Image: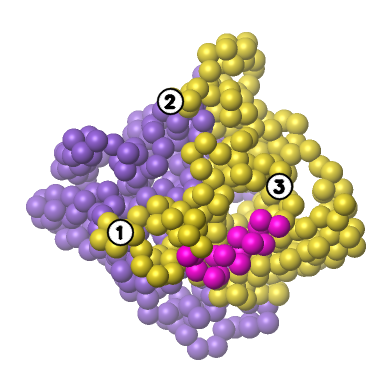
Chain colours: A purple, B yellow
Amino acid sequence: MAKKVLIVYANQSSGSFNAPAKNTAVEVLAAQGCTVEVSDLYAMSFKASATAEDIKGDVKNAENFCYLEEAKLAWEQGQLSDDITREQSKLAEADLIIFQFPMYWFGVPAILKGWIDRVLTNGFAFSQEKCYSQGIFKDKRAMLSFTTGSLESMFSPTGINGDMNVTLWPLQNGILHYCGFQVLAPQIFWAPASAAAEDRKSMLESWSTRLQGLLEEKPLSFIPLDCFDEKAFQLKPDVHKKHASKEFGLTVGIHLNKPLPPHSQMKAGC
Amino acid sequence: MAKKVLIVYANQSSGSFNAPAKNTAVEVLAAQGCTVEVSDLYAMSFKASATAEDIKGDVKNAENFCYLEEAKLAWEQGQLSDDITREQSKLAEADLIIFQFPMYWFGVPAILKGWIDRVLTNGFAFSQEKCYSQGIFKDKRAMLSFTTGSLESMFSPTGINGDMNVTLWPLQNGILHYCGFQVLAPQIFWAPASAAAEDRKSMLESWSTRLQGLLEEKPLSFIPLDCFDEKAFQLKPDVHKKHASKEFGLTVGIHLNKPLPPHSQMKAGC
């Protein structure tokens, strides 16, 4: 069955390595029969800040304006601004979402954080009941594909920036998995700007090869929602006990005061 | 000596708990003789996205535009846009920077990420040599003060969102400590929107008490830059060896495949 792919692209320039990375994804996925749509955030001058202007007409409580609540209500009533609604339609149709960006300050660029803050509206993308493994987008896949300024060795458990698995946890667990997405392993282009031309070429070739099997990849492992109690959202005693003799924690965040499971935010099946 | 404090404030509404949290900081610090300046990002309509418009006049390489490089050059030549220059002047004068915001998606709101992406310019805030414990702002202090939607128990090593120390690492190490800031323990207001009025009141009282001694607090612990080699930025063998018999890793990120040091991103001296 033909799949629909949305690439959310956050780079200002065709001169960046992010441009051929995005183009490679478009080409390889289209060649497999996928329909590929690109949201080029800078080209769209995508609004990043979450403000009352995101809501058409009057807000419910202008004096005590709460973005989370007002956006939820506006989504329910079809009153979200057109730029948000357009992105939500693309997302609703997509089977796979690829976020392509340069890592800025151990995270996503502000314009992409704006897409996340504004498009993943309360009600549309999550609710208190529908989150994590029971999340609204549990039949969709999502992944991060990004360039770094640092070398791979710097992002290790003995490197100056620390373990990349730790840096990825808030993004992959807190955003993607929270909405239910099956999270594919990240595609990390390590320091392409300081790499030799032939190394940059081989990075793209390896991405191209991966893209050919991307739709069949197993996602990263997270803990099912029903392993937590419904009051304090703590790991249930039987799950905790079952894991007591294990060497590693369950995930990077839910580490049970044990060593982190190696590569768990970087490779499927870890 | 009178201290200068900059509060970078990211909230849309006076109805949010972030407003009295910010006001409490202004009042208590001013009462101690501090000069307090507030950058109210939403009120300023602060531009969040890093674009070529941040540079006055012609950019060096329009075709292969690279924000990091172009912004560095513009800073050196006094060609950064006025909104960035104004924030840089406030930051340069400040002894303490407090970031006050609601946590959005395990991180800072896009408008605040925009302040970070645009104001902490290459050259002004860091260089390859001047980073981490040798960072440009090593004589300044900085801290995060934020509200959550989740309860404290949910952000634990056995809670559904995982350990808050993990979520804080990219922000506190990758942004604040990277620029050299001495990072004070975060002030976390757990789920004030769903708390009883008396609990909200006591959160503010406890913040007010903390603020009275804030300028004398010990910062969080990070690893000195000279513990890493200058080529691959790996922990030097003697430092690694010295720590081999210890129970916990050095920090959340530089965990040496051991259990994370408890509370190391939450409390000084951990």
Q: Quadrant of the N terminus of chain A?
A: bottom left
* Residue B218, position as x, y percentages in the image: 79, 38
Vertical side of A209 occupied by B121: above or below: below
Name the N-terminal-most of marks 3 and 1: 1
Kind of residue at badge 3? Lys
Kind of residue at badge 1? Asn
What numbered label is drawn on residue B232?
2
Please give left or right for residue A83 compared with residue B235 in the image: left
Q: Is residue B125 magenta?
A: no
| Extreme residue in the front direction | B77
What residue did someone put label 1 on? Answer: B61
Secondary structure of the residue carrying numbered label 1: loop
Magenta span = B79-93
Chain letter for the residue marked with disc 1 in the picture: B
Query: Mark 2 to mark 3: distance in Å?
Result: 28 Å
Q: How many marks?
A: 3
What numbered label is drawn on residue B140?
3
Quarter of image, res B71? bottom left
